Image (tube, rainbow, N blue to C red):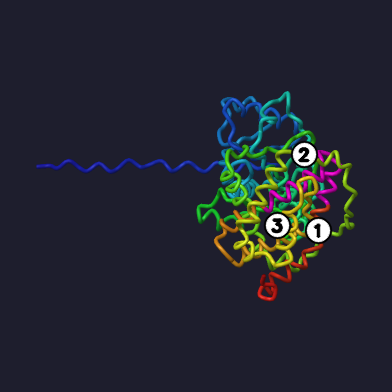
Amino acid sequence: MSSTPLIADAPQPPPPAPAPARNAELLICLPALEPDALPAALHAISSALPSESVLVASAAPPENPADFPSLDIIPYTSARSDVGWILAAGDYASAAQLAIEHNAQAVILLGGDTAALSTPSAFDPTLLRNLVDCIRTKNIDLVLPRFAVGPNDALFNSALLYPLSRALFGADIHFPLPIDAAISARLAQRLVSTTQRLITLHQGSALLWPVAEAAAAGFSVREVSAGDAAPPTPPPPATQADFNALFTSIAGSLFADIETKSSFWQRARSISASPVQASAPPPIAELAASPEIHSMIETFRLAQDNLQEIWSLVLPPQSRLALKKLSLLSPDSFTMEPDLWARIVYDFTLAFHLRTLNRNHLLGAMTPLYLAWVASYLRFVADDPTRAKHAIELTASAFETEKSYIVSRWRWPDRFNP
């Protein structure tokens, strides 16, 4: 009886060869956009950079890629930060990896607010062109936009982010927590390794401070005009708890980065800047405290009564005495001196490093002090742009002057125990 021979498996075709990497001088990474907004954004990029070889990374491809013959479009996933409206570690990691894979010499990351980009009639190409020109023609490693903001805008940035970056990292960058950024190929390579630990720990949405990264590595940093573009802002906090959570997220991330790079900033020299002199206050009629200022001062006064136990663990006696005197002032004469604010911030930075108490509780105890600074700033500025610029420079200059204070406390904390 004959047996039926076994039929061998048919040979499988070899797997398709991977598509060759598409090279481009410039890589632009977009955040996640609504499908109907993506074509407008791509048209805006094409019109702003008509002579560039551009590779665009997008969360989803357009329905009709042929409509954009000058652009090569590849997939990209935006991580977004824990606070949702600024670039995160995962954004830098993905963009940097794509830049390496495609041999891009420059990378532009566009951040959370693309309303103007996706509305051609409102799109101002100034920022995009300035980012590209600076990163490509001036051999700068990190380029960030400088937005034109009103005297009462971006106060957290003016109170903490800008003066700390300037004093500790020698970077005169007014918006060091970027919403848009341009990075060079060599900075992209560094960011891949820098962000690897965060990605491994599933913290791709955590904040990254590229100004500090660039400064610590000896890379060049510059800011350029954003034209008429306005920075996106977080949604107004519905409750005090929401505000505290936002404050804790950003300040905590910044303090942690300062802790990580302490060996650098203790040696680094601050930028050379002329001392800023306090100006005479405007006429008293312009200084009448608004209800908003009254509310901030009242929050500070309540904290002065209720948070002494925590503040005594963080602040030295002279600072606590200055705060007590401040709490007794009337709203129409309420003024927190810049040097006092700088020392307070430095003391809380050190307490964060030493884990003097739970970090969330620590930063929660700092928020009324920040509100006291805001109340003083708003009263001083009186809604005047020139005075606002002067007040911001006074604050940053104070942080530079007091840098020796934080260096001493950081190195010998026991010697300065409250």
Q: Disc 3 or 1, which lies upstream in sequence?
A: 3
- Viewed as shown, does residue 83 lie left or right of 289? left
Asked whether residue 195 appears in the rendered view, the answer is yes
Main secondary-structure element of the magenta-colored stretch? helix
Label 3 Cα crowd, 10 Å radius (few <14 / some 14-19 / many 20+): many
Residue at figure coordinates x 73%, y 26% from the top left: 122
Q: Disc 2 or 1, which lies upstream in sequence?
A: 2
Residue at figure coordinates x 72%, y 48% from the top left: 157
Residue annotated with mark 1: 398
Closer to us: 258 or 9: 258
- Viewed as shown, does residue 245 lie left or right of 124? left
Relative image position of residue 175 (x, y in whole percent): 73, 47
Label 2 Cα crowd, 10 Å radius (few <14 / some 14-19 / many 20+): few
Amino acid found under the numbered disc labelled 2: Val
Relative image position of residue 83 (x, y in whole percent): 59, 44
Disc 2 and disc 1: Cα gap in Å? 22 Å
Nearer the viewer's eye, disc 3 or disc 2?
2
Q: Which residues are magenta?
A: 369-393
Residue annotated with mark 2: 149
Q: Residue furthest left?
A: 1
Amino acid found under the numbered disc labelled 1: Ala
Residue 188 within the magenta-colored segment of the rendering:
no
